[in-house]
Amino acid sequence: MTERRDDSPDIPLPRASLIAYTALMTDESSDTLLAGYRRFRQDRWPEAKAEYEALAAGQKPHTLIVACSDSRADPALIFDAAPGQLFVVRNVANLVPPYEPDGQLHGVSAALEFGVKVLGVSRIVVMGHAHCGGVAAMRTGAPDSVRDFVAPWIAQGEPVVRRVAEAVEPDQVERASEEAIVRLSIDNLRTFPWIAEREAAGTLQLSGLHFGIADGILRALRGPGRFEALD
């Protein structure tokens, strides 16, 4: 970059950190992130500057979305959302664990609490997607290389997926499993008392969706076992 802007305070670093604190982003020809940032600054920022300046005063998203971390299913793109509209929580297989205030580290639950109690979202959406690797691992087992965190994380969905796999035809197992995980996460959302209370009062809506990567179609949960394509 030709211009260096650094508003950060000078913080003493451990000696080892002076060697290579982080990888530098300097070569646009080989760094797709840097190239994307340059396009953002050149093409998007001039027209969005006022919008971002307003957002600097605070955010008020209308929807909290729990989605998979999969790079092919980006909620902001799928919903053509502007900055500040969506509060997005992404993890492997779009899972919501049940309410468990035990003082341990619960990233999804913390995001839910912040989105509902502080930001005051009016809707929570759980969005699964086709060809989900996390749900596939619930059926076949997580690879040995991801036993530290992925395996115990997806274990919470394995019983549901096993039941679904036994109840449908083989060619329906993949999608039925993905839809079952959306339903499981919706059910687990209702174990949070402050979510259940707001849903009962009509101030918070819960929605389940499934995104088809190959066809780009969103299907919405309409009943206990029924997803229908949206127009």
Image: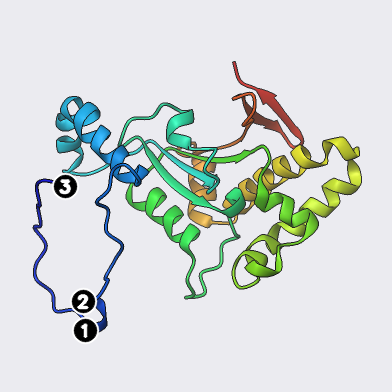
Label 3 close to label 2 by CB (< 8 Å): no
Q: Quadrant of residue 16?
A: bottom left
Q: Quadrant of the C terminus?
A: top right
Three-letter amino acid code at disc 2? Leu
Q: Position of residue 63 (x, y in %)?
A: 42, 37
User: In terms of secondary structure, where does tag 3 sit?
Assistant: loop
Asked if residue 222 can be seen in this view, the reply is yes
Query: Tag 1: Cα neighbours inside 10 Å, few (<14), some, or many (≥20)?
Result: few
Q: Is residue 8 above or below residue 31?
A: below
User: In terms of secondary structure, where does tag 2 sit?
Assistant: helix
> Marks 3 and 2, how far apart in space?
21 Å
Query: Tag 3: Cα neighbours inside 10 Å, few (<14), some, or many (≥20)?
Result: few
Q: Which residue is rendered at x = 49% and y = 59% of the image? A: 109
Residue holding disc 1: 15
Q: Nearer the viewer, residue 218 or 110?
A: 218
Q: Which residue is rendered at x = 71% and y = 62% of the image? A: 142
Q: How is the image coloured?
A: rainbow
Left or right, 199 with respect to 41, comes to: right
Label 1 close to label 2 by CB (< 8 Å): yes
Query: Tag 2: Cα neighbours inside 10 Å, few (<14), some, or many (≥20)?
Result: few
Three-letter amino acid code at disc 1? Arg
Res 1 label = 3
